[in-house]
Image (cartoon, grey):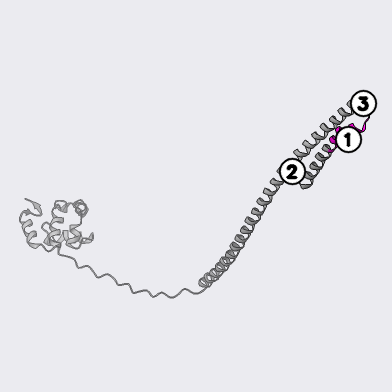
């Protein structure tokens, strides 16, 4: 850029010197012969040349400004390039760090895989099982204490898994009726509607309450 400024300044100085030489020194050196036409033509030619040179100077100045703009853009590009280089170095460092972490993770994974393979190849440890205790046999209750249940019906209920007062108390009346229906026609006349209520009192040991309830019954039916 400095050489262009120097060239423009030199060209301007030369034009000024040319103008001084023409208008001052040459006028004094030319004798007054009255040939003004020739001088006028030379003057016009000098002016045209001056205008051409001025035009070239403007072009050079425009080129200078364009060069300055390009230089500023180039400087900005250099700054951006430097920033990009710095970011690239940061990324390279991060990639190196991640590669190191990946290598460590692969080593840990390999170690875990080997341990898993060793564990799978080893025989399983012996497991000591505690002996299973057989449940204590359930002691059946005397279901004949329920009014309406005799020896035959008690045996029928036992065959259907009803052995205790608590089991009888938890059995639906409809199921008891189905059991009696299945047992035969002679048992269909029995009415089991109060048996669960009586059995509940017997299961809780409320014998007085059971007696009071049975005093109100007739053959297991409500009076």
- In space, the residues marked 3 and 1 are separated at their CA atoms by 17 Å
Q: Position of residue 35 (x, y in %)?
A: 93, 24
Label 1 sits on a secondary structure element that is helix
Residue 149 visible in the shown view? no
Q: Position of residue 180 (x, y in %)?
A: 19, 54
Q: Quadrant location of residue 69?
A: top right
Identify the residue at image location x=13%, y=61%: 202
- In space, the residues marked 2 and 1 are separated at their CA atoms by 39 Å
Region rendered in magenta? 17-37
The answer to whether residue 36 is magenta is yes
Looking at the rendered structure, which numbered label has been put on residue 25? 1
Comes first in the chain, label 2 or label 1: 1
Whether residue 59 sits left or right of residue 220 in the image: it is: right
On screen, 104 above or below 35? below
* CB under 8 Å between discs 2 and 1: no
Front one among 78 and 121: 78
Q: Main secondary structure of the magenta part?
A: helix
Front one among 28 and 125: 28
* CB under 8 Å between discs 2 and 3: no
> Of circles 2 and 3, which is in front?
3
Residue 64 visible in the shown view? yes
Q: Position of residue 192 (x, y in %)?
A: 15, 53
Q: Which residue is denoted by mark 3 in the rendering? A: 38
The answer to whether residue 41 is magenta is no
Q: Which residue is denoted by mark 2 in the rendering? A: 67
Label 3 sits on a secondary structure element that is helix
């Amino acid at each position: 850029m400095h050489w262009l400024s120097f060239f423009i300044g030199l060209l301007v100085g030369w034009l000024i010197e040319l103008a001084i030489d023409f208008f001052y020194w040459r006028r004094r050196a030319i004798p007054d012969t009255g040939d003004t036409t020739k001088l006028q033509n030379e003057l016009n030619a000098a002016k045209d040349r001056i205008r051409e040179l001025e035009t070239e100077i403007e072009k050079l100045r425009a080129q200078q400004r364009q060069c300055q703009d390009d230089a500023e853009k180039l400087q900005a590009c250099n700054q951006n390039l430097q920033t990009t280089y710095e970011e690239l170095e940061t990324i390279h460092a991060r990639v190196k760090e991640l590669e190191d972490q990946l290598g460590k993770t692969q080593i840990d994974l390999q170690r875990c895989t080997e341990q898993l393979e060793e564990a799978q190849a080893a025989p399983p440890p012996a497991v000591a099982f505690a002996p299973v205790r057989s449940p204590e046999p359930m002691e059946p209750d005397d279901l004949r204490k329920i009014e309406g249940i005799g020896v035959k019906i008690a045996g029928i209920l036992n065959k259907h898994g009803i052995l205790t007062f608590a089991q009888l108390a938890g059995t639906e009346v409809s199921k008891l009726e189905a059991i009696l229906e299945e047992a035969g026609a002679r048992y269909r006349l029995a009415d089991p509607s109060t048996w669960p209520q009586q059995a509940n009192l017997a299961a809780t040991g409320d014998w007085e309450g059971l007696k009071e309830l049975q005093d109100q019954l007739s053959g297991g039916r409500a009076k």
